[in-house]
Image (cartoon, coloured by chain):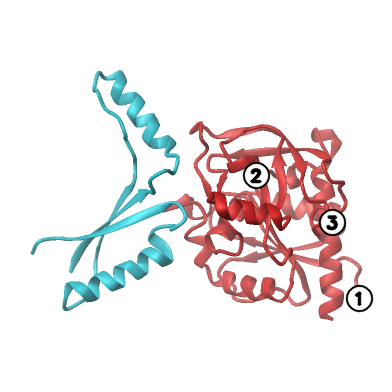
Amino acid sequence: MKASVLVRPKAGILDPQGDAVEHSLRKLGFEVSGVRVGRVIDLEVEATDEATARAAIEKMCHELLANPLIESFDVRFEES
Amino acid sequence: MSTRPVVAIVRFPGSNDDHDAAWALGSVGAEPVLVWHDDAELPSGTGAVVLPGGFSYGDYLRTGAIASLAPVMGTIRQFADGGGPVLGICNGFQILCEARLLPGVLRPNRQLEFVCEDAVVAVENAETIFTRRCTAGQQLVIPIKHGEGAWYADHGTYVQLAARGQIALRYAEDVNGAFANVAGVVNAAGNVMGLMPHPEHAVDPLLGSADGGLLLAAFVDAAVEHSLAAA
């Protein structure tokens, strides 16, 4: 089963990378605000149903993919 | 028994201050032994462990995140649980936070620039095994060199840590956006410390400062005590 994990800086956490990107977008003339930079991790897991896959991926997030002190995550499954 | 305690210095792929740490610890009385991250055991008679600076695993995912899962980390966790002194410098601090042996996390510097300069660091708690050769409030000049050194914990956690004396070192001014200018923290038991400044680069006045030697010498004292207690 293919899934994407979106890891984002938590709300309220300073994101200097997002600020720098926002600043550059403004220099290009885009009127933009609230830019935050996270990361996407695509992966495949062996699972017969989405609930099992989700449980496994959430465990991965807690143990490695995200740091709960500063990051939130969101799991999305690819439509097959 | 030798009076020089064995201090294990753990090398990960991408560590680069391991030899500096070995040299500096040797200069203050330790017997440094380099240990590979894939080793599940520490050298016999290890009195203390250092996680040195560098860029373990290329800082992939988050700094220290991959290294925190290395085979040697289970052994270090046991060593720390048994009261063994553990010091994480820079990347070592990041690894200890990711391993949750220390509170908080190191984030990218606020200015998004790598900082490389001498920093003035004040000793907030002079009663830890790492700072007891210093006096409270003493200002140390120790180099910093990092891109992701802004320590962060939520406000509630920070208040608790401060009340318990776990904030060991604080920058005299804002250098990287660290929460409350925190430069170094200890765990609740007081035997594990992480700091972003590099004491191993400040052990000789010829190179600008010998203040780092105060921290390392105190750490070596603790290594002697732990060796004797374990023997």
Q: Mark 2 points at which residue?
A: B182
Which amino acid, mark 2? Answer: Val
Left-right relation of B39 to A5: right
| Disc 1 with disc 2 on a shared chain | yes
Q: In which quarter of the image is the C terminus of chain B?
A: bottom right
Mark 3 surroundings within 10 Å by alpha-carbon count, few (fewer than 14), some (14 through 19), many (20 or more)? some
Task: Please tell me whether mark 3 or mark 1 is closer to you in this view.
Answer: 3
In this view of the protein, which residue sits in the foreground, B228 or B26?
A: B228
Q: What element carries label 3?
A: helix
**Residue B157 in the image, given as x and y percentages of width and height:** 58, 55
Residue occupying the point 91% across, 75% down: B1
Q: Name the residue under label 1.
A: B1
Letter of the red chain: B
The chain letter under disc 1 is B
**Residue A22 in the image, given as x and y percentages of width and height:** 33, 29
C-alpha gap between disc 3 and disc 1: 20 Å
Rendered shade, chain A: cyan
